[in-house]
Image (cartoon, grey):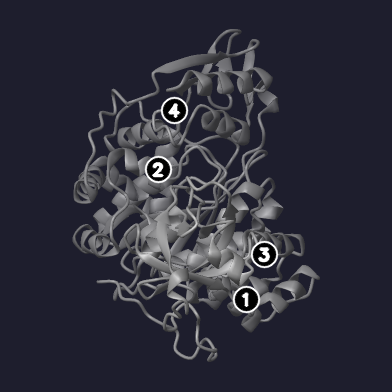
Amino acid sequence: MTPHDTKDAGAVPPVAPDPLTAAPDPVADASLQLVLRRVAIDTYRENVAYLHRDCPVYRAEGFQALSKVEVRANGQCILASLNVVDDERIVGCRELGVSEDAFDQLGVEDGHPASISQAEPPSSIPALRRKIDGERLEQDDFRAIVRDIAAHRYSKIELTAFVVASSRGELDREEVYFLTNAMVLSGSRLDWREHPVVDKHCIGGIPGNRTSMLVVPIVAAHGMLCPKTSSRAITSPAGTADTMEVLANVELPMETLADIVREHRGCLAWGGTARLSPADDVLISVERPLSIDSPGQMVASILSKKIAAGSTHLVLDIPVGPTAKVRSMSEAQRLRKLFEFVAGRINLTLDVVITDGRQPIGNGIGPVLEARDVMKVLENDPSAPDDLRQKALRLAGRMLEFDPDVRGGEGFAIARDILDSGRALARMQAIIDAQGAKPFLPDQPRCGRLSFDVKAPADGVVTGIDNQQIARIARLAGAPKVQGAGVDLFCKLGAAVKHGTPLFRVYADYSADLEFARQACERNSGYMVGAADEVPHRYVEF
């Protein structure tokens, strides 16, 4: 049950010595030795080095801005993109500045001796160029590309080229498998020494869909192993890790998480500390600002993380709705088949569930508001959102049916009994305490101190709720960085409203954020009011 790193022996052909692990190559002229300086700039998963234009090393080596360089200090070596500065307040002429990410990777003190040299071009560039030209790549090509991405050998421009080329040309299903497998091989892989190891994932796009925080304690209370490592929000108002952070610490060493999982059969933590599928983390840094989430890259990202985390069984939630990521049942079925093909090739047991994605799930959107909804469901509070409760029970029931002792169709009733009896709440509280509890009162959540209500423009029925616009409003209000910011929904699809009926409330902590959200609501509130027969058709496959 304790995780161990495992390697796919013989999976990657022998390569030339890696400059990142080779012995350091000290600067020949001691007078050119530089002093490391921590530059407090968050470059989001990109290593950046800074040299002053008048630095003797910069002049002697003929560096160019944005070129790839090797930075060495105390036997450690990283690759970075070079920025050239003219202000000695950033870096002096005898200093080598590095960004926050790069400094953490080197693991030395500020002021430590360091050296810098030109980096060799990534060996996978010819394969990248073929993909840009629209060619189909083979397994070895993807392994080479992903190996270079994980080692930070690609610049942001080269990363963008790969992401756009893979999205524009849409990878075929074999290429998606090659990319997924390459991502798994690029990092650590956990072995829990147990079977089954279960997990649940949603492809995203539905605000407030915080079912994982209910599914994990239900399944763990049943006795199944469910080590849930989740992401922070990329384009949404909150990820599972952001919401769990309202209740407990989510940034824990892998050894600590392993102990928690061993004792409590589950956890809810941020996956960034485990270095699982690190190439995917780098690719996300480019996909996020471009808002690119192509089917092939989505499948590779999700499944590589699950396999690397040691999961053997996965329930996958694909919501379908007019403003969800997936807009039609036919599109959902195509995506389902792609997931099932790749999962079969990597020996992952997969159960795909197509769910209702017409509107947000739960009432709260934003970390504090979503945590409130989760705790109300766990506490069987009569005011808990029933849609969140029902969806979590159905997903938990499907996961429980991975247990060979549970008959097909019996999972929902078992999950409901675990929730109604209070066993799920007790298990969640145990996990929270083990991870490091934070004070939280569900009846008095720490919502933003500023707020305004958005009201119905006319009499009628709520016929549409735009998931993307509601998420955008919540983010403009400050979520997820401001935990108490977000949107609290009062009306769902089919609700009868009068002119002036409050539809939702926006919370913010800062007046500028509140004003941004208010202006967005004035342009488009995300709500449509009309006749009852205009409510969109529901796509569900449980």
Residue 158, numbered label: 3
Disc 4 marks a residue whose amino acid type is Ala
Q: Residue at 55%, 52% (x, y): give it.
A: 203
Please state if 207 lies on the left or on the right of 267 as rendered.
right
Labelled pair 2, 1 in contact (Cβ < 8 Å): no
Query: From the viewer's perspective, is residue 371 above or below residue 63?
Result: above
* C-alpha gap between disc 4 and disc 3: 36 Å
Residue that label 4 marks: 485
| 1 and 3 marks in contact (CB < 8 Å) | yes
Name the residue carrying label 1.
Answer: 122
Provide the secondary structure element on which disc 2 rests: helix
Residue pointed to by mark 2: 242
Q: Which of marks 4 and 1 is in front?
A: 1
Q: Distance between the residues labelled 2 and 3?
A: 30 Å
Q: Which of marks 4 and 3 is nearer the N terminus?
A: 3
Query: Please, what secondary structure does the residue beneath circle 4 have?
Result: loop
Mark 1 falls on what kind of element? Answer: loop
Q: Residue furthest front?
A: 31
Which of the marked residues, 2 or 3, is nearer the chain's N terminus? 3
